[in-house]
Image (cartoon, helix red, strand yellow):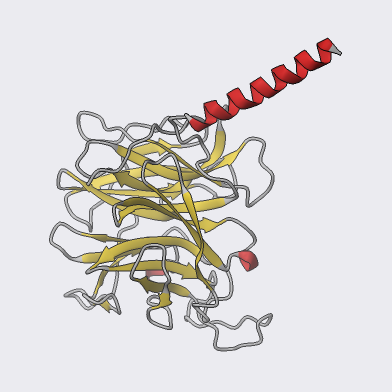
Amino acid sequence: MRHTCFLILCGLWFSVSTQAQKATDKTSGNPIFNDWYADPEVAVLNDSYWIFPTYSAKYEEQVFFDAFSSNDLVHWEKHEHVLDTAIVPWVHKAMWAPSIIEKDGKYYLFFAGNDIQNESGPYYDASQGDKNKQGGIGIAVADHPGGPYRDYLGKPLIQDFYHGAQPIDQYVFKALDGQYYIVYGGWGHCNIGRLSDDFKRLVPFDDGQLVKEITPEGYVEGPTFFIKNNTYYFMWSEGNWGDSSYRVAFAMADSPFGPFERAGTILEQDPEIATGAGHHSILHVPNSNDWYIVYHRRPIPNQGRDHRVVCVDRLFFNEDQSIKPVHMTFEGVQANPINQ
């Protein structure tokens, strides 16, 4: 009996000790939050870190977006269904790859919907019984990063397959000259377009083109941009999203139009940690030299096609300002309280 009591007491002490250790943990851990998510977009909004991912599931179940906020990159608060198909009635499946940007006190959430496959634009899905279903890249808008959001246009911003690019995987950014651009594209093609000041349309270029193709060697999908020391960094995903070939490459140029020459791979599988690492975004902590990459990967063992989780690791640069290969970890990153 005395031996049994000793074991029980030891078990209680171990449980309390473990809980205390977790409570004082200084790192985010990877994945950084539970459940299956992919295609994370990270941003600093309203003095907080925010991540908007794709819900990783069957296309027919991808009918909403959750968001996550944090003040230190370690403790994350979940904001459920900040956008869903009840708010955007022209979408009925495959809500993908949200991209968030603040402008003039409003928060614009760009997203892809319906996995549109038809080159001519509107398509017919017999299962829906509606010949006027649409698809492509849409926009929602809100007064706060966590919503509530409303459908901004009531239709897609981009629906046609310009230069062979499927209208998915959009990323929106502000260039050095103050112009806002959207880059996007699947099926091995990437386009860039100029956004009107109110984000309601694309502004044609001087040659009449609505978008220009900037596809680099190896590009498949998932484009993202960032600017450092007046240089444009273009990053994208290569390989097959469903297997271990998925990876991230990058290029650098003095213009958002390139030319972008592939400089190398910076994120790929590590058989000791995870496979299928890709479709990421980049975080620069304001007023610091701290850079991070937020991405999805496939845990080992993997439980199926849609088993993807969101992770964060540090991003470092070489002396020539090229990007160093990312070291994937289980630990994640240390707490970094946001300081504006």
The image shows residue 241 at horizontal and vertical percentages of 54, 50
Q: Which residue does the image show at 38% across and 81% down from the upper left?
A: 153
Q: Is residue 163 left or right of residue 198?
A: right
State the quadrant of the N terminus: top right
Q: Which residue does the image show at 53% across and 76% down from the upper left?
A: 91
Tally of numbered discs: 0
222 versus 283 height, above or below: below
Q: 175 and 336: which one is in front? A: 336
Q: 151 and 138: which one is in front? A: 151
Q: Which residue does the image show at 41% across and 33% down from the upper left?
A: 333
Q: Is residue 36 left or right of residue 234?
A: right
The image shows residue 53 at horizontal and vertical percentages of 48, 55
208 versus 252 height, above or below: below
Question: In the rendered image, which quarter is residue 205 located in?
Answer: bottom left
Q: Is residue 215 left or right of residue 240?
A: left
Q: Is residue 257 left or right of residue 213?
A: left
The image shows residue 105 at horizontal and vertical percentages of 25, 68
- Identity of the residue furthest to the top in this view: 3
Q: Is residue 338 visible?
A: yes
Question: In the rendered image, which quarter is residue 292 located in?
Answer: top left
Q: Is residue 171 visible?
A: no
Q: Which residue does the image show at 43% across and 82% down from the upper left?
A: 155
Q: 232 and 18: which one is in front? A: 18
- Identity of the residue furthest to the left in this view: 177
19 versus 164 height, above or below: above
